[in-house]
Image: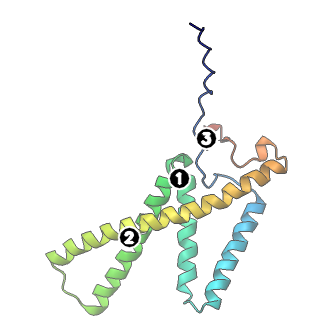
Amino acid sequence: MEPLEPRPSLPPSIAPAEPARVPRRYGVGTLLLFTLLYALLFGLMQAAGAPVVVPISLAVFFALVGLGQMLLFRGKKPRLASFLVGGVVWCLIALADSVMIWRFQAAPFNVYSVVGAFYFLLIMFLCGGLLGYGAGCLLAGVFLLLKPLEKRRGCADEANPFADTEIDGIHQDQ
């Protein structure tokens, strides 16, 4: 009987990849990039003949989703934060529209309208959550593309927007 060959060593455990997200701090170049992206959004919407409220609504929606990724859960759960912010913002928009419709059409307000509004808001929350998730993916994708550029330029850790930060003596994880 031949001696058994030693088993090849198993690869070391691989740490899970950090999720793409909007970092909690970033440089002037990133601000200029987002200014350019907003300018393109407004220009394309104006060229398409969209009403003024459409690009403003989209810009506010994207900005709120980005803020949600940065601030909710201390930036540790960007996908969930995008979903929640998108759902809440979409519900607020739907609620404001419904109030305006009820006010101007003088629709009767009864139990059935309350139950219908509840289901309507639930559906709007889910749809808004999916839109918020998509918006968060787009925003995080921009930062994901910027990450290698920052490394290529040889930025120091203190200038790296993806490094841990310490603000006011409190250590904050990204």
Alpha carbon distance from label 1 to label 3: 16 Å
Residue at disc 3, secondary structure: strand
Identity, as a three-letter code, of the amino acid under mark 1? Pro
Callouts 1 and 3 close, C-beta under 8 Å? no
Residue 78 circle label: 1
**Which quadrant holds residue 95?**
bottom left
Residue 91: mark? 2
Taking 103 as reference, is 140 above or below it?
Answer: above
The mark nearer the N terminus, 1 or 2, is: 1
Mark 3 — residue? 172
How far apart, in angstroms, are the residues tagged by discs 2 and 3? Answer: 31 Å
Which residue shows up at 63% across the image and 21% down it?
8
Which numbered mark, 2 or 3, is in the foreground of this view? 2
In the image, residue 162 above or below residue 126: above
State the image coordinates of residue 109 (x, y, percent, origin top left).
19, 81
Question: What residue type is disc 3 on?
Answer: Gln
Q: Position of residue 173 (x, y in %)?
A: 60, 40
Left or right position of 39 against 68 = right
Residue lying at 60% horizontally and 53% vertically, measured from the top left: 21
Of pointers 2 and 3, the one earlier in the residue sequence:
2
